[in-house]
């Protein structure tokens, strides 16, 4: 299946299949009861999502939206879980996928724990270059999303990006 920028793959709270991202980037937004949204994750090629449902089913934690054009395989839940039961060696593969995602998230936590706003942005840019290159951070995420991702206000991101461009 092809998703174009801005198209939704699934909605928070729904249940359904798993998905393999062949190419592109997805963002996962968490929607709060007041309607506000926060960017909680970016999904990169070769990930199978939702991560929290790789072994047992659970409703979608957030809403998945294409950041760029994406190619996605739909993995029907019933056959996914049936294959796991029939081929227990697949659990190792899933454990390795989750390990890779955990390491990626540990780097994200490192971004959030930086004290100086400029350091947070620098660490996010390095993370982005490592996992998402060749796409540029500001071509994929809005300043508001960048701020959400590293715990800063959009105005601060704007000021840091302007200073970087001028410097």
Image (cartoon, grey):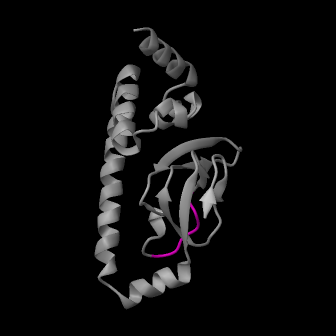
Residue drawn at (48%, 80%) of the image? 80
Query: Dividing the picture into quarters, in which one does residue 144 lie?
Result: top right
Q: Residue at x 67, y 41 (%)?
A: 36
Please say whether residue 57 is one of the residues in the magenta stretch.
Answer: yes
The percent position of residue 100, horizontal first and vertical second, equals 31, 57
Q: Which corner quadrant of the image does residue 130 belong to?
A: top left
Where residue 62 sits: x, y (%)?
58, 55
The magenta stretch is 56-61
Q: Main secondary structure of the magenta part?
A: loop
Relative to 37, residue 24 above or below: below
Is 134 left, or right, of 8 in this rendering? left
The image shows residue 51, relative to residue 153, as above or below, that is below
Q: Residue at x 63, y 46 (%)?
A: 5
The x and y percentages for residue 159 are: 51, 14
Residue 55: where, in percent of width, then height? 42, 75
Assess whether residue 160 is covered by the magenta stretch: no
Circle count: 0
Q: Quadrant of the C terminus?
A: top left
Asked if residue 12 is positioned above or below residue 82 in the image, the reply reads above
Q: Residue at x 48, y 69 (%)?
A: 53
* Residue closer to the observer: 133 or 101: 133
Q: Residue furthest right?
A: 34
């Amino acid at each position: 299946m092809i998703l174009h920028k801005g198209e939704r793959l699934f909605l928070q709270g729904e249940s359904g299949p798993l998905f393999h991202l062949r190419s592109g980037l997805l963002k996962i937004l968490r929607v709060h009861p007041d309607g506000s949204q926060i960017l909680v994750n970016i999904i990169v090629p070769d990930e199978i999502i939702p991560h929290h449902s790789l072994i047992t089913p659970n409703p979608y934690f957030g809403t998945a939206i294409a950041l760029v054009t994406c190619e996605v395989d739909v993995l029907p839940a019933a056959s996914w879980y049936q294959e796991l039961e029939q081929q227990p060696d697949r659990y190792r593969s899933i454990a390795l996928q989750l390990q890779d995602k955990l390491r990626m998230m540990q780097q994200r936590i490192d971004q959030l724990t930086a004290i100086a706003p400029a350091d947070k942005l620098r660490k996010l840019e390095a993370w982005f270059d490592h996992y998402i290159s060749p796409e540029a951070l500001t071509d994929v995420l809005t300043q508001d999303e960048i701020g959400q991702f590293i715990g800063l206000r959009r105005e601060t991101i704007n000021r840091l990006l302007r200073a970087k461009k001028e410097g």
